[in-house]
Image: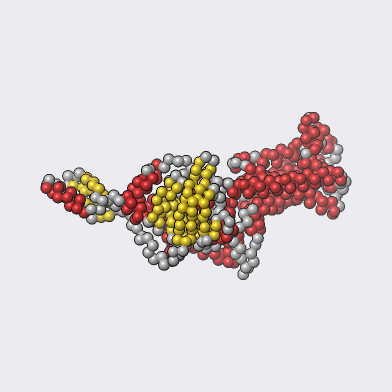
Amino acid sequence: MTRSSPQLTPPFVDRPTADKSALAVSGIRKRYGDREVLRDVTFDVPEGRVLALLGPNGAGKTTLIRILTTLVRADGGTARLLGHDVVRDRARVRELISVTGQYASVDEELTGRENLVMVGRLLRLGKSEALRRADELLEEFDLTAAAHRRVGHYSGGMRRRLDLAASLVASPPLIFLDEPTTGMDTRSRAALWNVVTRLARGGRTIILTTQYLEEADVLADRIAVLDGGAIVASGTAAELKKRVGRETVELVLDDGAVIRSVTDGNPERVRLLLNRLHSEGRHVRTLTVQNPTLDDAFLALTGHSTATAPTDKEPAR
Amino acid sequence: MSTATLPAELVFAKRSITHSLRNLDSLVTAVVAPVAIMLLFVTVFGSALDSTVGGSYADYVTPGVMLLCAGFGAALTATSIHTDVSKGFVQRLRTMPVRASGVIFGHVLASVLRNLASIVIVLLVAVAMGFRPTATPLEWLGIVGLLAAYVLVFTLIAAAWGLASKSVESAGMFSFIALFLPYLSTAFMPADNLPGFLRGFAEHQPVTLVIEALRGLATSAPDSTTLTHSLLWLVGLGVGATLLTARLFDRAARS
């Protein structure tokens, strides 16, 4: 019997942090003109956890991140980051966060190393300290070989890594990643996933947005599904899948016929099915149990798949 | 081992200067263009225009070429600032404990330094071609101050333009203004040669006033009215452009 569901890291294991809230979001609303981008978004992220905000294009993910990172003011609701209000204490909040956006915001005319040193200097590191930190990050993000090349000549994946490295110069406890792997090839994506996993193990709190279910599944402790400006479901990947609750058995017969049956986790139904086939004199070649995927969950929760999301893109700036 | 920290403004200034030195466009604009324009005007038009301006054309045209080159160089600021705002660089800064407005300061300082260098090149070529200023040290100080103020004000206007632009193309349009404004002044020939409606504009626009003030200083015959008027223009435009830039930067970064 093979299980075809993706490998999951059990949630909340190996994370000894107390359940202190790193980010508490309550009733956030935002409207652009007559378009309601966010309506009553509420969630909480405990310290040291990874939360994925999963949703299609236009669900409001980027707007929400912009509000949480002090760039945009919400029309209503509050957000507190390690106890600091994102509007009133925004100067303090900016010392606690790092933000990596969809578009790499590094300087193309400078080399990778110069970029990191510049960020260090902006954060008031002395020259030698800024250099030391830059080299450390270049090493960590596998960019040492490209350290003295201008970023304009970097590949897309390298740029994203440098962008993330630049956001980590100050070692902030809270990391926002807005669609960190959108448009990346498989290899770069895997490399970035490794980096995120490492950061999470280091005890950072990470909030990432993604439209890739697999990404949320692999990286996040908790997933909040954002659709049409509201959180329509949240929980661990396993919990979300269970809510959909359809376990399917797939049988391939000797004559090549394929039978699929929904079991709802009940083995008795499988036995009856096998008995019937046996009495009909048909032989089963393979049997596979398929657990519901996050795709199924998403479809069930939002009424549409991520690929066919209807709405247009949020404003770019 | 250095542990001294730098104010954000200086970090950004260093960045902008590095950009200027690495960007082919800005190097050509700052170094090649002044030489080419100076050569062009003095050798091609010079002999024909000596009589029109009543003296050496090199003496007549040098202040205008200085302003033309400096203005054209300063116009690049519009594109640099627009790029920083539209490509996410400023947005990233806004999420950091950093004075993001320092970006503007950096570009402005780099532009002033770059274009003063470009003016020095114009001056060297001009002297080689027969420009013979008779200014006293004090008048030279005035010349340098006036040129620096002109470059600063032009850069600030370019900054505001770049922030107000919706695309890189429209940000780049400022170069045309920088290029044409001196042609509609007394930079290359006296205003009497222009048709009536342009003459009125050419005689009163700030570029003409600054050029005439520079000519006066260079020939040791400063005219206090022109000087005062050009300074008033520069202060007015400078203050206006600074306020506008600050406002537009705030808006661009918050939207």
Residue at 59% across / 49% down in the picture? B254
Residue at 21% across / 51% down in the picture? A287
> Which residue is most to the bottom?
B1
Position in image of residue A38 (x %, y %) = 49, 47
Closer to the camera in the image, A17 or B160? A17
Residue B173, placed above or below residue A140: above
What color scheme is it? secondary structure
> Which residue is most to the top?
B196
Q: Please indicate whether residue A198 sits to the left or right of residue A2 in the image.
A: right
Residue at 79% across / 40% down in the picture? B208
Residue at 35% across / 55% down in the picture? A239
Q: Please indicate whether residue A181 sits to the left or right of residue A167 in the image.
A: left
Q: Please indicate whether residue B185 sits to the left or right of residue A209 in the image.
A: right
Position in image of residue A307 (x %, y %) = 39, 44
Residue A181: in sight, yes or no? Answer: no
Position in image of residue A129 (x %, y %) = 58, 66
Residue A87: in sight, yes or no? Answer: yes
> Which residue is most to the right?
B221
Quadrant containing the N terminus of chain B is: bottom right
Closer to the camera in the image, A169 or A93? A93
Position in image of residue B54 (x %, y %) = 86, 38
Q: Please indicate whether residue B147 sits to the left or right of residue B107 in the image.
A: right
Closer to the camera in the image, B74 or A44? A44
Residue B29, placed above or below residue A112: above
Q: How many marks?
A: 0
Closer to the camera in the image, A312 or B62? A312
